[in-house]
Amino acid sequence: MSDGRREDLAGRSVLIAGASGGIGAAIARRLHAAGANLTLVSRDLDRLRAVGVPARLQPLDLRDPEQARRAVEVAHDHAGRLDIVVNAVGVVAFGSVSELSVDAMEELFLTNTFVPIFLAKAALEVMEERGAIVNISGVIAERNLPGMAAYGASKAAVRSFDEALAREARRNKIRVIDARPPHTATALSEHPIEGTAPRMPQGLAADVVAAVICEALADGATALPSTSFEAGR
């Protein structure tokens, strides 16, 4: 769904959280090519440097709400405003509910669910009209799977949050885009916080997912269900 208006991304101030991950880095490179003014955040400064685009680099642990607020402040100070927030932060765990530890469940929700909430809360205080917030919940937010119940629930919570947030933010003419790409070929599943990944189908390339998300930012889209990514298969 689109509002029919194209947005020029050149010069737009963009905060990318989780910018050192596969999807986050791919989005950063595409937005740099489009002329955006980037602030990149993750926990590891060396991995941020490896993204390889000119940007304000800021290592922060966004699981701390004060550091999430700091990320927004840094992006706003860097460019004098904040237009777009892309949240590509995420962790995964595998295992049945009976096997998965409570610690792993708590970490899934802290990282996958609370980080987008912390960032959105801070960003809405400074964003101006025609801004956008993108959260990546993934196809699992549409259809959960056994062995990934807690992970899927943490992502479904993001989708539910985005649904209501979009209505609240609309009052200030800010879009909220819930992106739900299918399984994507990144290193995320290779480094779960607990458990072992099952055999996965061939995933989409991270750059394909990034292209769809960046096009959505440009064309005024307000929703990115999993079907939006089918052309990239």
Image: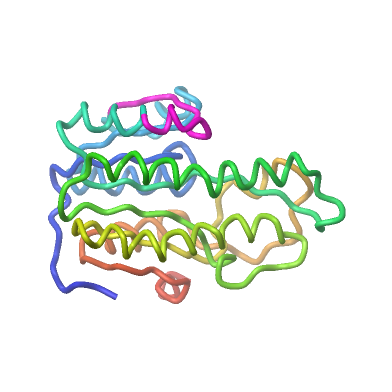
* Colour pattern: rainbow
Where are the magenta residues, as a range? 56-69
Point out residue 46 in the picture as x, y percentages from the top left corner: 47, 23
Query: In which image quadrant can residue 169 be found?
Result: bottom left
Point out residue 156 in the picture as x, y percentages from the top left corner: 56, 62
Vertically, is 198 above or below 1?
Answer: above
Q: Residue furthest right?
A: 98
The residue that appears at 37% across and 59% down in the rendered structure is 165
Q: How many marks?
A: 0
Vertically, is 101 above or below 211?
Answer: above
Residue in front for this viewpoint, 61 or 26: 61
Image quarter where the N terminus lies is bottom left
Point out residue 117 in the picture as x, y percentages from the top left corner: 45, 47
Point out residue 114 in the picture as x, y percentages from the top left corner: 52, 44
Residue in front for this viewpoint, 25 or 174: 174
The residue that appears at 46% across and 36% down in the rendered structure is 20
Quick check: 70 left or right of 194? left
The residue that appears at 37% across and 32% down in the rendered structure is 69
